[in-house]
Image (spheres, grey):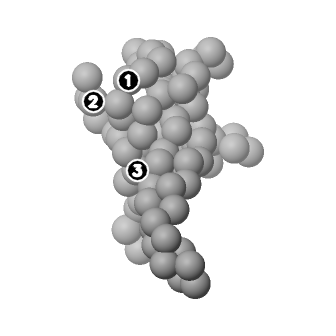
Amino acid sequence: MPKKILNGIVVSDKPNKTITVMVERKYQHPTLKKVVKVRKKFSAHDENNKFKNGDKVKIIECRPYSKTKKFEVLGDNK
């Protein structure tokens, strides 16, 4: 099964080697037929602490680093 790749914006970089990424997606509600915008936060591993608040990043699914951290930053996004 392929790994999920998500696009988002960094909203927090306070923990060491961790960033919090806000991912936004749109989908059509099955009953109401209205387009709904949903935001979700993911914790991602940032080995070199190089991403700061407001940066656009791609994150990819990986092995669990901790209880909540199951994504890592993909390549060089700057």
Q: Which numbered circle lies on residue 77?
A: 2
- Amino acid bearing label 1: Asp
What SS does tag 2 mark? loop
Crowd class of label 2 (few under 14; some 14 to 19; many from 20; radius 10 Å) = few
- Is 15 rendered above or below residue 72? above
Rendered location of residue 64, percent (x, y): 61, 48
Do the numbered discs 2 and 1 sit on residues whose CB atoms are within 8 Å? yes
Q: Which numbered circle lies on residue 15?
A: none
At x 49% / y 71%, what residue is drawn?
34
Rendered location of residue 8, percent (x, y): 42, 40
Pick the residue in front: 23 or 47.
23
Q: Is residue 17 left or right of residue 27?
A: right
Rendered location of residue 69, percent (x, y): 63, 41
Q: Mark 1 and mark 3: span between their CA atoms?
A: 14 Å
Q: Mark 3 and mark 2: span between their CA atoms?
A: 13 Å
What SS does tag 3 mark? strand
Closer to viewer: mark 2 or mark 1: 1
Name the residue carrying label 1. 55
* Mark closer to the chain start, 2 or 1: 1
Crowd class of label 3 (few under 14; some 14 to 19; many from 20; radius 10 Å) = some
- Is 5 rendered above or below residue 35? above
* Mark closer to the chain start, 3 or 2: 3
Q: Name the residue at the bottom extreme.
A: 31
At x 58% / y 22%, what residue is drawn?
12
Q: Which numbered circle lies on residue 6?
A: 3
Task: Choose top left, top right, bottom left or bottom right for residue 77.
Answer: top left
- Is 59 rendered above or below residue 36? above
Crowd class of label 1 (few under 14; some 14 to 19; many from 20; radius 10 Å) = some
Task: Choose top left, top right, bottom left or bottom right for residue 9.
Answer: top left
Pick the residue in front: 15 or 64.
15
* Mark closer to the chain start, 1 or 3: 3
Residue 75 is at least partly visible in this image: yes
